[in-house]
Image (cartoon, grey):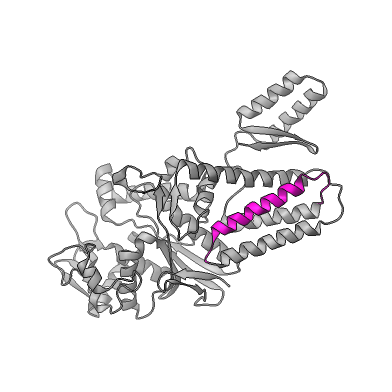
């Protein structure tokens, strides 16, 4: 029984899908005018884990995440880089996938682009105009916000609060300051499409409403994104979708918390805006992933050298424990009897993992139980005598965590092939037998330079990458 904190109701609710055993989930993706930053990585990782856990729990999930490839920022960036907007967005979509794949995220079932849905967007807007939910002024089309009687229900803001606030753009041609653009008339030098309202392009909010409807249907199970999207983006999506569809847009709304850099909110103006591709030059992607999951997805998280170093230490502890486990499995074992106590501990560990993930996907507690599994495994693999079936149970338990949390324990940037390492270790062992300690030490030192550490144990020589 999975519980989700629903931003719409501001409480945890038992997840009840529209269709039995199926989940329709839409996650707001990036506006592709630049490389993604560390803040973008949080929803990518957080909702990938949500998707993974639904799959683990036996649900058939359709996971959609869009690319906004029509936007003011894209137009400006294409002018600055002096390339067509299509070339610019293709460039940054390719870069996005490089970061996305490196973080261990499963590709979405669909990554719709706004530019591929222009006819559907125009038809959507036409219906809103025809039903008097929207109006045209000089080639622009605006949504009549006050026509949505419960506008503000997601962000918990009243019409009065919004009017008195400073978050509404002033615009003389709007009927009401709260109204927002569905279609923008083309300006000189900008990309545009013909429409009944004149040449122009979609507003930001209309894009996701249309793509969600076209890829998942009128009402979806889960809509997710960063906390900063709650208002106005998601609020406006609800307004235009529910007026158009005459049905609830999404049953559950999920939002991840902000990310701070050294205790300060990330901002270009503060100069602490950090691109993920640059971080990846010095930090393993799986360390970044573990760092993101070390805090509950709705809680703010602080990125600093200290927190990343802690994540690196914890990741290496997990990986080393798993490698030692595989080492013992590959070597002789003398104990014939299954160790019931260890097997029971592993079973209890999985039960706790599921309990935490069922409680609004609490990855922080899930990780703490993985560290407990590391302790159990380390104690067992250090024994002189171990049982193969018991080791297999521990291995399967590790792999359950990998499946759900997506933190791979496989080295993807090896400097040397495993077979070559094993051959060098064999040569070192032969040199030691021949009392050629100078050669043995040289092989050990050469391996260390390649990031390979050797450990002499009763069961033989183990090696690991650092």
For image coordinates 38% across by 66% down, the residue present is 211
Closer to us: 290 or 413: 290
Q: Could you say which is closer to the camera, residue 109 or residue 287?
A: 287
Left or right of 175 in this view: 56? right
What secondary structure is the stretch in magenta mostly built from? helix
Residue 256 seen anywhere in this rendered image of the structure: yes
Residue 202 drawn above or below residue 78: below
Task: Write the residue at 34% across / 77% down.
Answer: 242
How far across and how far down the image is residue 103, in percent? 51, 49
Q: Residue furthest front?
A: 263
Horizontal and vertical percent position of residue 412: 58, 42
Residue 415, compared with residue 105, is above or below; it is above
Rendering quarter of residue 152: bottom left
Q: Quadrant of the N terminus?
A: bottom right
Q: Is residue 373 magenta?
A: yes
Expressed as whole percent of the image width and height from the top left, the position of residue 371 reads 63, 52
Give the quadrant of the C terminus.
top right
Q: Is residue 442 magenta?
A: no
- Quarter location, residue 176: bottom left
**Residue 215 relative to residue 341: left or right:** left
Q: Position of residue 436 (x, y in %)?
A: 78, 19
Q: Is residue 82 visible?
A: no
Number of marks in the image?
Answer: 0
Residue lying farthest to the left in this orientation: 172
Could you tell me which residue is drawn at 31 percent across and 46 percent down?
268
Q: Residue at x 80, y 45 (%)?
A: 383
On screen, residue 196 versus residue 51, left or right, reads left
Residue bounds of the magenta highlight: 360-387
């Amino acid at each position: 029984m999975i519980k989700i904190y629903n931003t719409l109701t501001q409480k945890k609710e038992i997840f009840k899908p529209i269709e039995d055993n199926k989940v329709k989930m839409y996650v707001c993706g990036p506006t592709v005018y630049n490389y993604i930053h560390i803040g973008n990585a949080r929803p990518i990782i957080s909702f990938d884990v949500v998707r993974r856990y639904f799959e683990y729990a036996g649900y058939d999930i359709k996971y959609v995440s869009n690319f906004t490839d029509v936007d003011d920022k894209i137009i400006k960036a294409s002018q600055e880089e002096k390339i067509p907007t299509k070339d610019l967005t293709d460039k940054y979509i390719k870069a996005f996938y490089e970061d996305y794949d490196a973080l261990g995220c499963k590709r979405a079932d669909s990554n719709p682009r706004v530019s591929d849905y222009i006819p559907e967007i125009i038809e959507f807007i036409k219906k809103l105009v025809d039903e008097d939910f929207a109006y045209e002024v000089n080639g622009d089309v605006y949504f009549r916000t006050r026509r949505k009687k419960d506008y503000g229900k997601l962000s918990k803001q009243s019409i009065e609060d919004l009017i008195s606030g400073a978050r509404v753009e002033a615009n003389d041609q709007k009927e009401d300051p709260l109204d927002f653009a569905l279609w923008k008339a083309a300006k000189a030098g900008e990309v545009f499409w013909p429409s009944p309202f004149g040449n122009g392009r979609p507003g930001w909010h209309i894009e996701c409403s249309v793509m969600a409807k076209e890829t998942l249907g009128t009402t979806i199970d889960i809509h997710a994104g960063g906390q900063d999207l709650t208002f106005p983006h998601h609020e406006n999506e609800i307004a235009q979708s529910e007026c158009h569809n005459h049905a609830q847009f999404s049953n559950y709304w999920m939002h991840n918390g902000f990310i701070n850099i050294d205790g300060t909110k990330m901002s270009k103006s503060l100069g602490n805006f950090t691109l993920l591709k640059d971080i990846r030059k010095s930090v393993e992607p799986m360390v970044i992933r573990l760092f993101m999951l070390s805090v509950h997805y709705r809680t703010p998280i602080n990125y600093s050298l200290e927190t990343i170093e802690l994540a690196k230490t914890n990741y290496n502890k997990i990986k080393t424990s798993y490698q030692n486990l595989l080492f013992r499995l590959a070597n002789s074992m003398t104990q014939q009897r299954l160790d019931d106590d260890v097997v029971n501990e592993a079973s209890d560990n999985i039960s706790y993992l599921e309990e935490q993930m069922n409680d609004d996907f609490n990855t922080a507690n899930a990780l703490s139980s993985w560290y407990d599994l590391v302790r159990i495994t380390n104690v067992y693999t250090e024994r002189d005598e171990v049982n193969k079936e018991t080791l297999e149970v521990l291995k399967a338990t590790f792999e359950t965590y990998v499946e759900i949390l997506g933190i791979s324990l496989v080295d993807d940037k090896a400097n040397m092939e495993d077979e070559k390492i094993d051959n060098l270790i064999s040569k070192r062992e032969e040199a030691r037998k021949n009392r050629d300690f100078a050669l043995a030490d040289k092989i050990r030192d050469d391996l260390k330079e390649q990031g390979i550490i050797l450990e002499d144990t009763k069961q033989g020589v183990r090696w690991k990458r650092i």
